[in-house]
Image: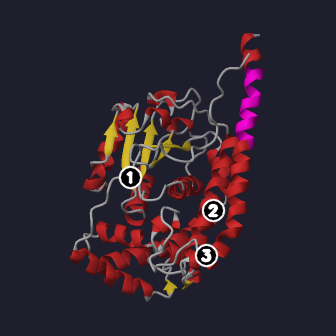
Amino acid sequence: MSGEPVPRKTPLEAPLPESKPAVKPELTDEQKDKYAALLEKVEALSEVQCPKEKEKSGPLQDREKAWLSRECLLRYLRATKWSVDDALKRLEATLGWRREYGLDDFTPEYISPEQETGKQIIIGYDREGRPCQHLNPGRQNTDTSPRQLHHLFYMTERVTDMMPPGVESLSLLINFKPSKQRQNTSVPIATAREVLHILQNHYPERLGKALIINVPWIVSGFFKIITPFIDPVTREKLKFNEDMTQYVPSEQLWSADWGGKLDFEYEHETYWPALNDMCRARREEKMRRWEAGGKIVGESEVYMMGGEDVSVKGVAYGSAAAAAAAAPEKDAVEEVQEKMKEATLEEEDKAPAAAVAATA
């Protein structure tokens, strides 16, 4: 006799086939000229300046050059109303902030204590293929500290790792359902403003939708307080207590509280390594493709993410040189796939035992 279905405990790897990114409008001739002008200026960058921690200033690193993709430059141009000078200043500021903040150096082990209760979960994709980042304030397990914010932006970086080719934004799902355990879920106004400042200045054009449910009156008042600090375009993306299946297919919408059909249970020792292994493999593949394309500033994210096999400079990833550069990554991807398979088998093995326990 087969056992009861076992809840999923690992991230979903891809959106449903019918979930497609919105078609991006073609650039106008003026916008193409603006992009070309910004690209020329960014290609001339040789150093990252860190005004708050000058000792961290230094030559532009490969991972920073890869970050300066075609789509990244366009996001900053759109965020600055196509001002080349303003976009350049913001790009330079973000490069400095990322170094000073230590964003690329946070390890899974350092972040793990903040994640143990699953207060942030990356699971599922919305109807435009955007990965869903769930925030569960009721699962808060630590007091306000720098690592709490590090956790938030570490997960924001991981959700960008999970974006499929052609997708540049995420869906943020926030559930204010209270927990039975006493936890400090209040957020100081100063902290909220810092988070908003970082998101708006260093992650422009990254928020697709913010879906929020179970909003208590005190949180509703909180949103009213911070609304003046939220960009008008961002405000339009906020959706409160709506039918979330409008935005996320029920098959990929977490069933707990959200009204979806995805049976998911957070188990830290299973989910956390699976997420980090998957994201690490995707980052390594992205860098390998970037290197095979010539290690240029302004490379296509679609190419780097595997959505197409020809780089901006016309280098075919299937060429002998590119294949040689990509070969080691195959082992990394297969390693992650094997771990995911083992985790799934473990979940299936637990099913009969769980069924017996349930009937005992």
- Residue 145 position, x and y percent, is 57, 53
Q: Residue at x 48, y 45 (%)?
A: 15
Judged by depth in the image, the label closer to the viewer, 1 or 3, is 3
Residue 32 can be seen, yes or no:
yes
Amino acid type shown at disc 2: Phe
Amino acid type shown at disc 1: Pro
Q: Nearer the viewer, residue 251 or 197?
A: 251
Magenta stretch contains residue 344? yes
- Residue 285 position, x and y percent, is 61, 65
Q: Nearer the viewer, residue 113 or 353?
A: 353
Q: Is residue 315 left or right of residue 326?
A: left
> Dividing the picture into quarters, in which one does residue 223 lie?
top left
Q: Main secondary structure of the magenta part?
A: helix
* Disc 1 to disc 2: CB gap under 8 Å: no
Residue with the mark numbered 1: 21
Start and end of the magenta stretch? 342-354
Residue with the mark numbered 2: 106
Neighbourhood count class around disc 3 (C-alpha, 10 Å): few under 14, some 14–19, many 20 upward: some
- Image quadrant holding the C terminus, namely top right
Secondary structure category for the residue under label 1? loop
Up-down relation of residue 101 to residue 233 (above or below):
below
| Structural distance between the alpha carbons of marks 3 and 2 | 30 Å
Up-down relation of residue 114 to residue 82 (above or below):
above
| Structural distance between the alpha carbons of marks 1 and 2 | 30 Å
